[in-house]
Image (cartoon, coloured by chain):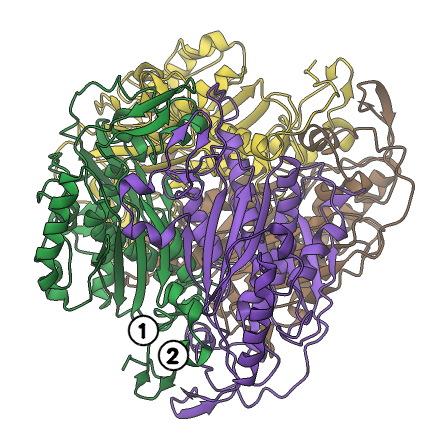
Chain colours: A yellow, B brown, C green, D purple
Amino acid sequence: MSGNTYGKLFTVTTAGESHGPALVAIVDGCPPGLELSLEDLQRDLDRRKPGTSRHTTQRQEADEVEILSGVFEGKTTGCPIGLLIRNTDQKSKDYSAIKDQFRPAHADYTYHHKYGVRDYRGGGRSSARETAMRVAAGAIAKKYLATLGIVVRGYMSQLGPIEIPFKTWDSVEQNAFFSPDPDKVAELEAYMDQLRRDQDSVGAKITVVAEGVPPGLGEPIFDRLDAELAHALMSINAVKGVEIGAGFASVAQRGTEHRDELTPQGFLSNNAGGILGGISSGQPIVAHLALKPTSSITTPGHSIDVSGAPVDVITKGRHDPCVGIRATPIAEAMMAIVLLDHLLRHRGQNADVQVTTPVLGQL
Amino acid sequence: MSGNTYGKLFTVTTAGESHGPALVAIVDGCPPGLELSLEDLQRDLDRRKPGTSRHTTQRQEADEVEILSGVFEGKTTGCPIGLLIRNTDQKSKDYSAIKDQFRPAHADYTYHHKYGVRDYRGGGRSSARETAMRVAAGAIAKKYLATLGIVVRGYMSQLGPIEIPFKTWDSVEQNAFFSPDPDKVAELEAYMDQLRRDQDSVGAKITVVAEGVPPGLGEPIFDRLDAELAHALMSINAVKGVEIGAGFASVAQRGTEHRDELTPQGFLSNNAGGILGGISSGQPIVAHLALKPTSSITTPGHSIDVSGAPVDVITKGRHDPCVGIRATPIAEAMMAIVLLDHLLRHRGQNADVQVTTPVLGQL
Amino acid sequence: MSGNTYGKLFTVTTAGESHGPALVAIVDGCPPGLELSLEDLQRDLDRRKPGTSRHTTQRQEADEVEILSGVFEGKTTGCPIGLLIRNTDQKSKDYSAIKDQFRPAHADYTYHHKYGVRDYRGGGRSSARETAMRVAAGAIAKKYLATLGIVVRGYMSQLGPIEIPFKTWDSVEQNAFFSPDPDKVAELEAYMDQLRRDQDSVGAKITVVAEGVPPGLGEPIFDRLDAELAHALMSINAVKGVEIGAGFASVAQRGTEHRDELTPQGFLSNNAGGILGGISSGQPIVAHLALKPTSSITTPGHSIDVSGAPVDVITKGRHDPCVGIRATPIAEAMMAIVLLDHLLRHRGQNADVQVTTPVLGQL
Amino acid sequence: MSGNTYGKLFTVTTAGESHGPALVAIVDGCPPGLELSLEDLQRDLDRRKPGTSRHTTQRQEADEVEILSGVFEGKTTGCPIGLLIRNTDQKSKDYSAIKDQFRPAHADYTYHHKYGVRDYRGGGRSSARETAMRVAAGAIAKKYLATLGIVVRGYMSQLGPIEIPFKTWDSVEQNAFFSPDPDKVAELEAYMDQLRRDQDSVGAKITVVAEGVPPGLGEPIFDRLDAELAHALMSINAVKGVEIGAGFASVAQRGTEHRDELTPQGFLSNNAGGILGGISSGQPIVAHLALKPTSSITTPGHSIDVSGAPVDVITKGRHDPCVGIRATPIAEAMMAIVLLDHLLRHRGQNADVQVTTPVLGQL
């Protein structure tokens, strides 16, 4: 399959550029009979939407999604769901300054070498604007998973140098940063205000958690659940690292510390992040992702142009000083897509399996 | 596709359990005309082979591979390459003690819930023994990539708490740890000797690097090169985290620091790890992976059995106290497989593209 | 992959129902740099469009396509091409009569059993209206193939009992039937006029030919070029049979008759239909497809309703009395999609191959 | 995916050449808990095996299969099943005469142009010897389907000019031709004896039927059940045509004749061949395939060599004068593989669907 489709039974295919007429997606394989409304999609789209606080890009996009197919009388039909979002705020600014330049840390140089031609307006296909459709598709997956009691949620766990301890889910939707600690918000705001004054950007760390996932999802060997999560999460713009459970902390752990012991009352810990041998264990699935600082900053940088000559690049336009801030709903969407795809695969192959061993919770 | 196949144009499908009769693989899509001998495969198999030092499992496996098809008169034919490795040291020990128990941090519990039945001998399909075939398949990919000047190599960058700075590739094959610093080897040996006395295990960090990769490999959006590398590397047993380039360090970086500026003389840094917008930039591709400590340790652990009753599990047998030690050739193999798959995909779609912009090296 | 995507490197994903708001497609993997305009797509869409003669459905659909992405400054960028066609003539007629009935020979009964719910308006997803998007996607494939001198064309070779011998390509676009014999047109018109008076429908046979295809396209074993053509052509609504070359006539042929002998001047015949061992030979690729008579006819038929009770079904609405009449551009589109997909796959794997043996033409 | 893998959830990957050391297959996605023995596979392998009557090739192959993985204590584990068949009768004859010649109607010319190199011994990968592994994999699918009451069977419906009417399944396994009419066997034998005297070959038509298939299998739009069957059956060596149900006879049918009316007592006919809108209807699934005459005949034929010079080719060796004779178990295997794959896909997506409408039988 070419690169713009994800999944095997539940598949998401997207198209659309930052400054083209529209974004479009086809979501295939959604189980039939699921109640689905525009509001279900819009809720998450609004969480990702630009321009909702001073800490994100000031581009104004309504991000209003239209359902073109696959839903009839308020329910999914099992047929593919077409989704459309018109771009409305593609400012007709003059791109001639950058059309022959390669902005550092952007995909300009690599798209140029790969395709020879490229849509340079706002990054074209490589823009994070594309992720709007992932969020819409993910909202469908989340809705179905919710009917089975599976909840996928995320939060910001670090902004630049500021670590954000998990306090409460209640806080996450109450601030512009998806911070699970309400007491950290003032510090985050001050940091971001200074960052804008510095004309710089910064990275972030996002944590995504799925609760209520039954044991059994994931296919050995190559389609392990953790491997597919790593794929899906690393495919998000700006992501440079993915961890499952203890992640890189596992390196310095001893086996006696890392192994999550089992008791009849439940697992004693969750270093595994809910996945053993590539298959969900019934524990919460926990993933962390590292996002690099936004590449588009107004501080000039050294680069070259298409002829190979040196240039100084200044990236104007409206950009997020921390792309990680809007990444939480995107990460949730990708995790939900992976989980639903694997749920369908699992119950396809293993419909006959009956196990009497109790499913453990977590202590 | 079911879970035991990786890749789209260059695909690797494997089967085989730890204590079954054999491991088998089918490598499909290899370009024709490549000179390929058993020695090409055996070299890497021997690097992964158990029992070559006192720091790895004492299981004795010759890991002699047989080529069943796809090679004729010393050259690949373009047809699928069948590979076979007979298991020779599947000790007929008594597994009745663990057949109804779930070893902590193993896949026992999850396979049981997924499939209802499982081959409990030595972990069955979930055993790292399966990775022998990845190494054999990867050796084919490496051989083809080498004809284009692409070299894929790895080394251990951390063992438990001991960080190993990169000194020289010359050191890597000269010690049992794939350490790039010869001066660290004594410390590593002492650490491992103590670890065995403690009846414990420990994690490790491996770094893999591909040099000579042309710009252009990787497919937006979901099949980004970094996303597929994350998939492939996370699919290796015990891996809990994957980083590309600066990885999690990106979180605390500022944009002015992270962005790799370009000059006519080359890139000024490589925080990107050789991938921008999901596409190779021509810089070295750099990935790090975190491996958890071996789950099989002789120190007893709490668990349950298939009826849900509490048990104390003692894992006997011959196990690696640090699975990371033998992971370097496996990680190299997976990176090589991903790169070759993407090379074939890229030149399929973009055969017409001619770009006159010079390809930059790295300063 | 779920069922609404076709292809591996060049992929086409579609969505949309007969009476929903729109049809949508995402065409992925098109080589970059191809000049592409709306006219390129519209030309074939108009050939398939309903209501252009009295012999097809009188539904009026402009079938105006919009390109949403993947084309920049008149050229493809290598990124996915989003396509949109709004449905404009979804008559708001009353479907309550048939919503609980299963029309014989339609997909009503099977969709009902598969999904539990279905969009019954005009057949929903099972309507041949969906093929408009195949034609648009196929037009892109045809445009690229044409740059390599590959031409894909089709014609009607039989209408009901009337066999239509191939006379000249010049005739095909000059009549409503895609008849390659201008002298047959009057007979076809008379037959169709009588058929409408009979309130009945009839089948048809379409032949599709690709000329200029280089030898080498097609992947043994399962992805043979003929196997993929059979897949793609059988996936067209109403198709019940596919032949390559001599097809079912091969059954009664002897080997001395069937084999296409080779001479330095060219092949002496083309019973193979241009494919040997699943790989193109450089001869014209020839496929025939059988289309069943339209299921929607006004003559009442026996059926049941969702409760299992007997009903007499009368299918009103505007229908093609012979779906085969508009099938020629659809069949061309599917053949072009398969050929381009295989071209990309072939040159991905076999870019290094250099063969000095001359490519034979056909005598 | 490269071309040697078939299926999405239930996948079959094969490798191996006619005169190489072995054939190998990996069957992935088989549900766990299925009782499976060597005998289950051997039964069908023996039905396909060469040398069992004077009407097939006299090559002697035991075709003894070994199960390398995926079966434990007599049951499938859900993990991939590795299969191995050693070639035992690869006569070390001198192939130098044909190594630079292209045998008419063989894949020699096309493999040469595709890959540059080829294993010319006995056709290499293009030999029908490869189908042994399909039969073994198909036997696994059949075994699972049988647990659900689904039976897949085939027979020869035409040999050269001799049509063979369906009389009784009881006859099929009682003669060398898979003839369902015992009274035709003498005529078939006489025809074949004369054919051998003529040093010629002939085509055949095979019919495959699946009974007990529940309604609902098949995925619109491109992965229709009939489209995938066409793909799978056309991928068999020598197949030039595939029909579902009435097939090419549909062309001359009228709608009032073709449509299979429904009554509470059952369907009144089965022109559809058990598939409507690409989805199984619960009626028997019926497919016909046309096989061309064997290409390997001893009567000399015109051809060229790799330099383009004219040659006369005489194909020696041991060949089937009618490849169709041994094709019945292969066609059954491919149909079973497609059905199981679609069954798993269907119940993955539609596990929640409950339909109270009765499933109709056929009158």
Say left or right for D266 vs A307.
right
Compared with A155, A5 (above or below) is below
The residue located at (40%, 61%) in the rendering is C226
Does dot 2 land on a helix, a strand or a loop?
loop
Mark 1 residue type: Gln
The residue located at (48%, 56%) in the rendering is D233
Compared with C180, A241 (above or below) is above
Q: How many marks?
A: 2
- As drawn, the label of residue C283 is 1
Mark 2 residue type: Asp
**Chain hosting mark 1:** C
On the image, the x and y values in percent for residue C255 come to: 46, 78
On the image, the x and y values in percent for residue A180 come to: 48, 13
On the image, the x and y values in percent for residue B79 come to: 53, 67
Compared with C289, A323 (above or below) is above
List the residue tagged with mark 2. Answer: C260
Compared with A1, D149 (above or below) is above
Mark 2 and mark 1 residues within 8 Å of each other at the beta carbon: yes
- Residues at marks 2 and 1 on the same chain: yes
- As drawn, the label of residue C141 is none
Say left or right for D161 vs D95.
left
Label 2 packing within 10 angstroms: few (<14), some (14-19), many (20+): many
